[in-house]
Image (spheres, grey):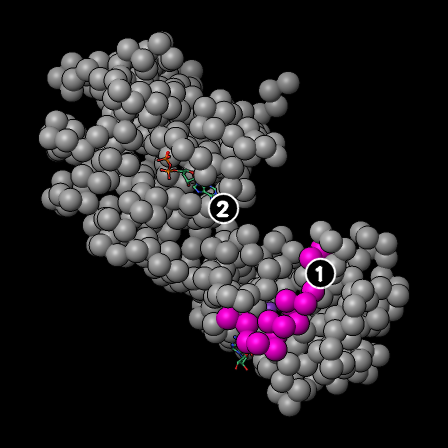
Amino acid sequence: MPIRHLTADAVRAAEHAAGDLLANGTLMRRASRGVASVVIEELRRTGGCYGRRVGIVVGAGDNGGDALYAGAVLARRGVACVALLLAPEKAHAGGLEGFRRAGGHVVGDLPDALDVVIDGVVGIGGRGPLRPAAAAVFGALTPPEDGGPIIVAVDLPSGVDADTGEVHDPAVRADITVTFGVRRNVHLLAAPQCGRVRLVDIGIDTTGAAEADTLWTLTDAEVGRMWPVPGPADDKYSQGVVGVIAGSARYPGAAILASGAAVAATSGMTRFIGSAAEEVVSHHPEVVAVHTHADAGRVQAWAVGPGMGTDDDALALLRDILATDLPVLVDADGLTMVAAHPDLVADRAAPTLLTPHAGEFARLAGSEVGPDRLTAVRELAHRWQVTVLLKGRITLIADPTGAVLGNDAGASWASTAGAGDVLSGMAGSLLAAGLSPQLAGAAAARAHAHAAVLAARGAPIGASDLLAAVRPAIRELRGVDAS
Ligand SMILES: NC(=O)C1=CN([C@@H]2O[C@H](COP(=O)(O)OP(=O)(O)OC[C@H]3O[C@@H](n4cnc5c(N)ncnc54)[C@H](O)[C@@H]3O)[C@@H](O)[C@H]2O)[C@@H](O)CC1
Ligand SMILES: Nc1ncnc2c1ncn2[C@@H]1O[C@H](COP(=O)(O)OP(=O)(O)O)[C@@H](O)[C@H]1O
Ligand SMILES: [K+]
């Protein structure tokens, strides 16, 4: 089952559906115990609980209540706990009483030399950036890498939008985020701001949430299982032939990268059309490369656009390709032409996958992506009735029905020239193998991100390194031990 992320409204609906468990405080008790367990684990990992120091920053709502109850659990374990109340008159009364009874102290300023700071400023009820008092508290902390406390966010890092993941300025940057029952959109959309996300079961049922409130992530195992590999009855045609149209004789790089990625991603055959045919074959002799569409044989899907130019010939070729009833991935220069000529895709019945970065997205949509990337990608896919893959650290893939899959690259090594050409070739191959545009995009994005991490191992990479790591990445996702 893919991992589900929900909007704040859908989370609240699930909490309310829990009835008595919400009303009698059971959910909050479970949530706060979960926060305490994560903090205890962290303290034990670094020397034990007794005598360690935890500071809690408490806002006006239930998020602060969670933090105070967690502080009570910690205080009973011998942790020296202090709480800074940002709005003393509005602090959660039960939580504050429990905290005090357990031996916690309320302070006017956080002391130095804390081991952990718990962010209980706001959770899913938060709006906008940290207000000045909270900003001053978090701004004064020494970063963990310089010996300062680690920051554990309750539910989400305060100052980050629960639904859109917009990181307001200022906002908390957490090392660990503890959330309850189900992940929220923010945990994917602002993953780098959340640190490690720990999910605590509080006994709510979230399966009834509407698709419009849901954002999905495939697990590595799911991507591994869906990756097409040859079976006993397969031949080179039966696994899907992909046609790559990219690059030029003058600029062959995109052609070489995209067709190489298509070869690496699946065992099906790769065809190539373009003036860089000779350069492509000299790098990848298995590619069947020709100069014109008329000379190309049959394919099951096309990947069109990287570095192909936008002149009249390129436009005519793109028009021919999009007039077929085959699945087509359009990237880069192809997207520039589609933005100028929306009629190219308007009447397509066959699957279409557009793979813009933010700049190309703005050309297609007529306005910038903006801070709400999720809504932006959903709306474009719906408006154009195509699948849209919006690239970046967090890649989002929306299909025309509004279903969205997301992928956190986990690192940013892939932000290098030519990395997009590699993604096009991979996703094109998966389309040819018969995956839907959304699954092809999501699986390719996961393997691409994984390849970047494997290739980089802590140092910058170029797109050729990324390409070389595509097979090892697929192997790992499939759980195959190559040794
Ligand atoms: N309802 C429940 O049973 C449960 C709720 N839980 C916790 O409750 C949280 C939601 O609680 P609430 O609905 O009370 O809302 P929050 O505690 O998230 O925040 C709302 C409060 O913060 C103030 N506020 C909003 N934006 C602010 C900002 N930028 N700076 C400073 N203050 C700001 C609001 O005026 C309001 O008083 C969840 O995130 C979770 O931590 C958990 O205990 C699980 C169960
Ligand atoms: N900050 C980032 N972290 C991780 N991956 C990124 C980041 N920025 C871009 N990427 C990925 O790198 C690739 C870049 O593609 P693109 O912008 O089209 O570059 P190019 O046209 O040079 O190939 C995409 O797969 C994208 O998702
Ligand atoms: K918080």
Along the horizontal axis of the image, is 196 left or right of 266?
Answer: right
In this view, which residue lies farthest toward the bottom?
89
Q: Earlier in the sequence, mark 2 or mark 1?
A: 1
- Tell me the SS state at disc 1: loop
Residue 379 at least partly seen:
yes
Q: Amino acid at mark 2?
A: Asp
122 is within the stretch colored magenta: no
Residue 142 is one of the magenta-drawn residues = yes
For the residue with label 1, is its CB less than 8 Å from the closest atom of ligand 3?
no
Q: Percent position (x, y) of residue 365?
A: 24, 53
Asked if residue 231 lies left or right of residue 424, the reply is right
Q: Give the residues drawn in magenta, as a range.
A: 129-144
| Mark number displayed over residue 142 | 1
Query: Which residue corresponds to the image point at 71% horizontal and 61% vertical from the top-left?
Result: 142
Residue at (39, 30) in percent of width and height: 418
Location of residue 250 with respect to 329 vertically, above or below: above
Q: Secondary structure at mark 2?
A: strand
Q: Is residue 102 above or below residue 159?
A: below
Residue 238's x, y, as percent? 31, 19
Task: Residue at 66% x, 87% y: name it.
Answer: 88
Tag count: 2
* Mark 2 surroundings within 10 Å by alpha-carbon count, few (fewer than 14), some (14 through 19), many (20 or more): many
Q: Which residue is mark 2?
A: 408
User: Residue at horizontal 16%, vertical 29%?
Assistant: 314
Residue 122 percent location from the top left of the image: 57, 73
Q: Amino acid at mark 1?
A: Thr
The circle drawn on residue 280 is none
- Depth order, front residue of 214/419: 419
Name the residue nearer the viewer: 155 or 88: 88
Residue 43 in the figure: left or right of residue 268? right
- Point out the quarter of the image occupied by ligand 2: top left
